[in-house]
Structures are given as structure tokens and as C-alpha cells.
Image: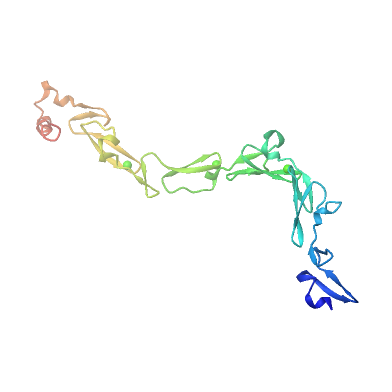
Amino acid sequence: DECSSNPCGSQGSCTNRLGSYECNCNTGYTFDGTTCSDYNECSASSNPCGSNSVCTNSVGSYICSCQNGYVRSGSSCVQDTDECSNSALNNCASDAVCTNHVGSFSCACKTGFVGNGVTCTDVNECEKSSCVTNAECINTPGSYHCQCLTGYVDINSLCADLNECGSPDTNTCADSAECTNTAGSYTCTCADGFEGDGFVCDQSKLCMPNNRVHLYCDIFMRSLSKPWG
Ligand SMILES: [Ca+2]
Ligand SMILES: [Ca+2]
Ligand SMILES: [Ca+2]
């Protein structure tokens, strides 16, 4: 009984015959006269992978891949053009993403835009999005941002009133005017003895050199020498 020495190997079953034996090999293996060895499917007269493909033999099986310039579509290899690689080959909008498919392509609007991919329109997020109090929404192509209103400053993503009176750099009150901070702005008021709109304050006529006898002006002129030098 030749089968007792397992001549067919691990990939086949052995049948004892009179003075001989027979190997019944597993799929992917063939009887080479002695044992069950790998069968090279790729050596068959017709490519088992089909047209436009490359067959690569492996132990007990084989692998199919597509030739250069071809892509897999189901179980066959077909020629495809990457329409996305050339804007002349697709009609996607400039604000869209082009995706290549076998035999076709598709367009989808980028984030922040709406449309069918061929036409994409900016979403005006400011119609819905709510910025914090005292901020305005600025719509931009594909996005938006929030910006504190004039007179407010961004502090921890909130818009807080700017105290313009805290620094001469942030107000244009006249030197002889009093600055008063308000929500979102400030006011300037000419000091006593001065006349004007707060931004330009002229010395009151009361205090002109030829008119200094006025009691009020006298008090005022004395006070001037301290805070305003
Ligand atoms: Ca394509
Ligand atoms: Ca937008
Ligand atoms: Ca203010």
C-alpha cells in the first residue's frame, strides 16, 4: 500500500491501486506524477484573470491585478480616465471637490458651500450663526468669523467694553476735557473754563487776559496750575 507513506502530501488524498496509487489533489494543486504540487493557473492558455489583467501565481492559488492604465470594476479590468486630474475633463465648480470613479467622476461642494457640485454657492453663516453680544458676524467665502464691534475688545472670546478713558491712546478728548467711558464708546466734556465739543476745547472768553477779573475764572486759573501744569 503506497498510500501508507502519504505520497500525495498534505494537499491531496491518496487512493491505493494494485501496484500503484492515485492522488486526488485539492483545488489549486495538481498531481505532478509523484505528489500534489502547486498548479500554476497563470500558465493556462487563457488568462484566468481576464483581459487587461496580470495573473500572479501563488502557492495553491493565484492573484489577479490590472495592467497599468486599467482599474478594477467588479471582477474585470477597465480603462478609466481620471477626469479630476485635468479641469478640462470635468465641470466641477472651483469651490467643489472632484472625485474620480471608474468610468465617471463626481463633484461635491466644499464645506461652507451649497450646491450640486457644478454650481456651489457660499453659505451665509451669519444668517444663522450667533456671535456673542456686542460682536458682528462677518461672512466670508466658505466660512465666517465674529468680530467685536467698535468700542469693544475680545476678552476670552467675549466682547467687553473698551475703557477708552484708560489711556490717551484710545481717546481723542482734548487735554482740557474730561473723558467719560460709556458702553461701546466714550464722551468728552470740556473742563470748566473751556468751551468746545470736548475734542477741541478753547479757553473760555471769561478767562481771556483782559477779562480775568471774573471770580469763577480766577478760581479756575489757579486750579489749572496743578493738574494741567
Ligand atoms: Ca473616471
Ligand atoms: Ca460663508
Ligand atoms: Ca467704552
Q: Residue furthest right?
A: 18
Residue 156 image offset from top left, x and y in percent: 37, 50
Name the quarter where the C terminus is drawn.
Answer: top left
In the figure, is residue 71 to the left or right of 21?
A: left
Count of labels shown? 0
Residue 50 image offset from top left, x and y in percent: 82, 51
Q: Quadrant of residue 28?
A: bottom right
In the figure, is residue 18 to the left or right of 87?
A: right
Residue at x 55% of width, y 39% of height? 141
Q: Quadrant of residue 93?
A: top right
In the figure, is residue 219 to the left or right of 34?
A: left
- Work out whether 139 lies above or below 9: above
- Work out whether 102 lies above or below 196: below
Give whichever of 154, 45 is nearer the camera.
Answer: 45
Residue at x 38% of width, y 39% of height? 150
Give whichever of 100, 138 is nearer the camera.
Answer: 100
Please state the quadrant of the image where ligand 2 appears: top right
Q: Quadrant of residue 10?
A: bottom right
Residue 113 image offset from top left, x and y in percent: 60, 43
Q: Residue furthest top?
A: 210
In the figure, is residue 172 to the left or right of 124?
A: left
Name the quarter where the N terminus is drawn.
Answer: bottom right
User: Which colour assignment does the render follow?
Assistant: rainbow
Give whichever of 72, 211 is nearer the camera.
Answer: 72
Residue at x 67% of width, y 35% of height? 87
